[in-house]
C-alpha cells in the first residue's frame, strides 16, 4: 500500500522522470500535488502497470490532483548538461508550471538539485512508496510515450513505438544501418560497442 504523504501538514508535490536511460528523445518529468485523502488502489510505479492502466490512471490523476505539470528537456540540452542535470531540470520545469505552490518536494531517486528555497526529500524507489511520486511517474511515462510515438511516425525504422528510445537490439541495429537521427543523444553510447563506428 502506497503512502499518501510524508508531511501531513504541508502541501507536498511528488516528482519523477521518464526516459533517463534512453538513447533518443527528450527526458520528461512530472510534478503532482494530490489531495491528502486521495486513494487509488491501482496506482503504483508506472513500470509495474500495463500501458492501458497507465493511461486510465492518467485521466484519474489529472482530474483529481490539486495541481500537476510536465517538464521536458530536449536531447540537445541533455548532450550539453548531461542526463543527470537534465533530469533535475525537467523536474524543475514541471514544478515551475504548478498552479499551486508546494511547501515540500518528494523526489524519486537519491539525488536532486534544490528547487529555489523549497525543502525536498529524496526517496529511493519512491514511485513504489508514495502516491504522489507514483502519480508523477505515470504522467511522465505516458506523456513521454505519446511524444516517442509521434517521433516514430516521422522515423519508423528506429522502432520507437515499441522501444520508446531505449537501447534495444533493433534500435541499435537501425542506428548502425541509418545513422543517428536529430533526436538521438550524441553523448550516449549509441551502438553499445566501441568497436563499431557510426555511419555519420
Image (cartoon, rainbow, N blue to C red):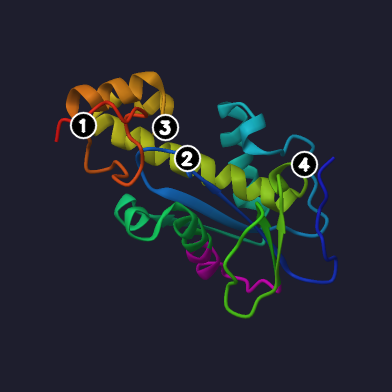
In 3D space, how far apart are the residues under numbered discs 4 and 3 (Cα atoms)?
27 Å
- First in sequence: mark 4 vs mark 3: 4
- First in sequence: mark 4 vs mark 2: 2
Q: Looking at the image, is mark 3 or mark 2 nearer the viewer?
A: 2
What residue range appears in magenta?
92-103
Residue drawn at 60 percent across, 34 percent down: 54
Q: Looking at the image, is mark 1 or mark 4 nearer the viewer?
A: 1
Horizontally, residue 75 falls left or right of residue 55, namely: left
- Residue identified by numbered label 3: 164
In 3D space, how far apart are the residues under numbered discs 2 and 1 (Cα atoms)?
20 Å
- First in sequence: mark 2 vs mark 1: 2
Where, quadrant-wise, is the N terminus in this rendering? top right
Nearer to us in this view, 35 or 152 = 152
- First in sequence: mark 3 vs mark 2: 2
Above or below for 138 versus 132: above
Q: Residue furthest bottom?
A: 117
Residue drawn at 69 percent across, 45 percent down: 127
Residue 157 in sight from this viewpoint:
no
- Few, some or many residues within 10 Å of mark 2 (<14, 14–19, 20+): few
- Residue identified by numbered label 1: 198
The image shows residue 56 at horizontal and vertical percentages of 61, 35
Above or below for 52 versus 103: above
Above or below for 139 versus 54: below
Where, quadrant-wise, is the C terminus in this rendering? top left
- Residue identified by numbered label 4: 40
The image shows residue 153 at horizontal and vertical percentages of 27, 30
Residue drawn at 65 percent across, 30 percent down: 49
Amino acid at each position: 500500500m502506497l503512502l499518501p504523504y510524508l508531511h501531513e501538514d504541508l502541501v507536498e508535490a511528488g516528482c519523477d522522470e521518464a526516459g533517463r536511460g534512453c538513447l533518443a528523445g527528450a527526458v520528461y518529468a512530472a510534478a503532482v500535488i494530490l489531495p491528502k485523502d486521495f486513494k487509488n488502489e491501482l496506482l503504483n510505479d508506472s513500470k509495474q502497470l500495463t500501458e492501458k492502466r497507465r493511461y486510465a490512471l492518467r485521466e484519474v490523476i489529472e482530474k483529481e490532483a490539486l495541481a500537476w505539470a510536465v517538464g521536458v528537456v530536449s536531447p540537445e540540452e541533455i548532450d550539453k548538461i548531461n542526463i543527470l542535470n537534465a533530469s533535475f531540470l525537467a523536474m524543475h520545469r514541471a514544478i515551475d508550471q504548478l498552479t499551486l505552490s508546494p511547501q515540500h518536494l518528494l523526489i524519486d531517486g537519491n539525488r536532486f538539485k534544490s528547487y529555489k528555497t523549497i525543502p525536498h526529500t529524496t526517496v529511493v524507489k519512491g514511485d513504489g512508496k508514495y502516491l504522489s511520486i507514483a502519480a508523477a511517474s505515470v504522467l511522465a511515462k505516458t506523456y513521454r510515450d505519446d511524444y516517442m510515438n509521434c517521433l516514430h511516425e516521422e522515423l519508423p525504422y528506429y522502432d520507437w513505438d515499441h522501444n520508446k528510445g531505449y537501447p534495444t537490439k533493433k534500435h541499435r541495429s537501425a542506428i548502425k544501418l541509418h545513422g543517428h537521427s536529430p533526436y538521438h543523444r550524441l553523448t550516449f553510447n549509441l551502438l553499445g560497442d566501441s568497436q563499431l563506428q557510426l555511419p555519420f
